[in-house]
Image (cartoon, rainbow, N blue to C red):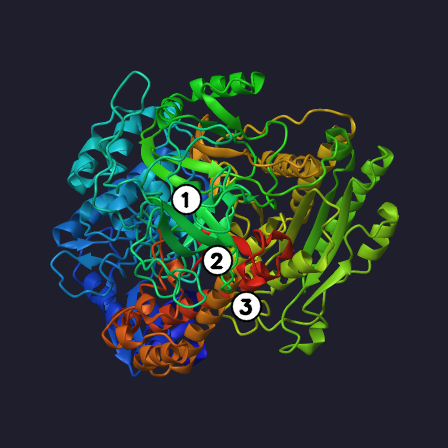
Amino acid sequence: MNSPLNVQIPGYSIDGEIGEGAMASVYLATQVSLERKVALKVMSQALAADPVFCERFLREGRTLARLSHPSTVTIHDIGNVGELYYMAMEYLPNGTLRERLAEGITPQQGLEWLRQIASALGYAHRQGLVHRDVKPANILFRADGTAVLSDFGIAKSLDDRTQFTQAGFAVGTPSYMSPEQARGQEVDGRADLYALGVVLYEILVGELPYRGTDALSTALAHLTEPLPALPPVHGRYQPILSRLLAKAPDERFNSAEELVAALDALPADDEITLIRPVPVVSPASPQSLAGMTPVSVDIPQAQAVPPAATSTAATRPAAAGKRGRGPLLAVSALALAVALAAGGWWLFKPAGQVPAEAGKTSPSAPVVAQAAEQPAVANGNHPLLMPGKKTLYQRVLSQPGATLREQPGGNGGAAIPTFSVLYVYQRQDHDGQPWLQVGAASDGQPEGWVPASQATDWKQSLVLKFTERSGRDPVMFLRDPKTVERLLANPASARKALAQAQANPSDDSQVLALEPKASAVPQDRFYLLPIFDAKESFDQNGVPVQLLNIASIDPGQAAAASASAAAQSFRTGVVLVVDTSMSMQPYIDQVNEVVGNIQQRMAERGELGSVDFGMVGFRNSVKKTPGLEYLAKTLIPLGKGGGPQAFLAEARKVKATTVNSASFDEDAFAGVMQAVDGMDWSPYGARVILLVTDAGALRKNNPLSSTGMNEAEVRQAAAGKQIKIFALHLQTPAGARDHGFAEQQYRTLTADANPRIGDLYVPVPGGDVARFGERVGEIGSVFADLAHQLRQGQALPSPQLAGAPSLADKSAAVGYAMHMDFLGRHDNNQAPALVSAWTADRDLANPALPAFQVCVLLSKLQLNELQQSLKLIVDAARATKTSPKDFFQQIASASAYMSRDPSALRQGGNLAASGVLGEYLQGLPYRSKVLGMTQDLWLSLSVAEQEDFIDELESKIRLYETFHNDVANWVRFGNAEPGDALYRVPLSTLP
């Protein structure tokens, strides 16, 4: 950003910096000619080379200049001095609505300000402008208390034909985006009214109505989740709120004036209730996954048919948008987000039914392998290619009872483990029956023949993985989709069916199999849950849910331990990852005192060793500042032993540095990764990191970053070792300008798949030392009490998380899930063996909770190729940074070098057509920003957006290295070569 010392604009005297953002800095200045204070907005010089950003900046000034209303900010001047683009605006020093919400306001105060902003929006809409970013942070105040709408930087003229964003892209802040805005569709003033409805909900309730772990899940919540009901005390506002937040624009107020009239028509309310809200999320920079990241949601054209209205079946609400035929979720990522998108779950080629040769079978059995539109004999010594593909081989899954024969029509032969992944080398007909020559490896060595009826074509390697048991019920696998749909529409019936199935496991008339009740299928256990078919349905609130026809097989074998022995040996490892930069000594001392007290209490109960502590310190780049001594360092190994006194003796040696770092942000990710990779976690069933810092973390795009990773990738690396991260953020006055961005970072870093948990971000307002100690003690005590309960033989209650769970409740739910996973490992729990069954992607008894995570089964060769391809793209982007037009020519040259056809790129194609990225990414039910990148789209991105694109890919390259090194979770079938080993890569981590 520009330093005040470098900003010289004739006619203005710079007094100091007010704030800074991704595009511009704002300074307090004096307009010399009129001797008045102004807010001088100056665009970052780094963006001045981009004509699109320059035009966007000037457009904001021209847009504001057109407006003359008591509740819109006044603009005094606009222009540029060389590369300094500036805008002089009315100086409003009285804070934002976001700040006032955090302090606490009455609904009457908030509604008066809401009327003023609605009036301003009505005026703007009549001028043909849509704001597109209405939120508390953009509502300022004059000295007389008038609310003022600001920041029209992404406003759109309804008659403007100039496109500054790609068609289908969404711009705005996800927490306040209307469904149509999230989808990237055309918007009008009703989109602003939707955002104002979110603000109204915040005023009344003190929190957002929809909240996800990142930009994508937040936008998805606005698209699919029902509106939460207001507390009874605010029930009179429910009709207005329901209209404002209607999914369909036609069901909202037609104008802001109509909204104001509805507010004025409300009956008087004498009760004044002070709202003390939860901390409001600050807007983050465009680099943040959960800030103002542009998000697009792609909705397929075909209309899904909702279930018929009956007394038990859920009906689809009229506001639901269009959805495709059996999609997982119609979502795509845009700009910096990667997401699930439209696309069917049709993974297997339709054909006849498989005989019920073994296991429990539902009426809907998987389909058999059919002859492909492909030569019957492989070209050379390689498996057959999939039709229309140049690098993807045909694969099948073996069915129960399949046997390997020496030749087509042969008898006997060795049995093939059910659902083994096999490559197809030849297809032949013998006596009118199709046969397949198969092998476990792709190295040109087939192993024999199987009847096509004993195998299932596997066109896409999508598999499911159970989510953690932090509050959801065990998954039920049922005979038919109608039963799933009936239970989905009535959670009480689902709970009753689950209890009956658990009490009578031999009764398979309705429930074919259950996930274990008293323990979980371990997160690190390999099993196959392929998807044969899917149908979209709706829960009792009209929210879409996928009904899945799946198979299930667990090929692993291990000796089981008794549950009692498992309970006795359950241990918790807690590693404190502490910022040891200047000013942190009081917090280091407080951590030591709290941990010492917890250990002393456990020692008195004879439970020392049930919870072990370790410590990692982190600072900043020692190359930049050698005096810091270390970047990240293990200060106390986990489980060093010796009791409380030994730990305290080592902990008291830990001192904060006296040397200033090169930046306020520290390399927190280096500390976390040191804990993840540098500690021995194997003895522990519960694995926890407590990150303690008063600053943000250095991200991938910072030259001082040592990890080359961003929040999501660090979280995924920890999750790969079943480690949960809590982030205790000390919101000291010194870091006030950093708090909003840091909060978004740590919410992403600590995000949990359970929406009731949300994240494990723990703010400490004001950096209060005593309060900080209480929070550390609260978390530590939960795990100490968990160990005590288990030693006493007490059963752990299943978590029942409320709408706004406390830190202790969240910690208990995390501990419960870890213990369930631990018991599953000791009991050698396996996924149920099923040929075919139906289930849902959500918990039938509580559809708000996801039951599965979607993964892609990639071979080691494919993962290695993916990583190398991303490196190639990054290198090409870096090499052509000063000449973006040469980027695609560089990719074309790389395509030729890799023996791929570069002609498609020269004809205006995208990166998918280049062949640089493997074909295995194509056709998956997610939208890849990388595959869809074209030269025109690349050139339309700003310098900052191109840099973010590159940084995201580099971060994924680093993440794929952690997947590659995760030796325990690579699996080979039969005689497969090492390169054909398979790994479950979460779909959300693909580029």
Quadrant where the N terminus lies? bottom left
**Which residue lies under the disc numbered 2?**
741
Identify the secondary structure beneath mark 1.
strand
Considering only order in the chain, which callout, 2 or 3, is on the residue closer to the N terminus? Answer: 3
Residue type (three-letter) at the residue carrying disc 2: Phe
Label 2: few (<14), some (14–19) or many (≥20) C-alpha neighbours in 10 Å: many
Q: Along the line of sight, which residue is nearer the eye, 925 or 652?
A: 925
The amino acid at mark 3 is Gly
Q: Does residue 674 appear in the picture of this structure? A: yes
**Nearest-to-viewer mark from 3 and 2:** 3
Residue 117 appears at what percent x and percent y?
26, 46
**Callout 3 touching callout 2 (CB < 8 Å):** no
Q: Which mark is residue 456?
A: 1
Give the residue number, with chain letter if any, for mark 3.
708
Q: Secondary structure at mark 3?
A: loop
Residue type, label 1: Thr
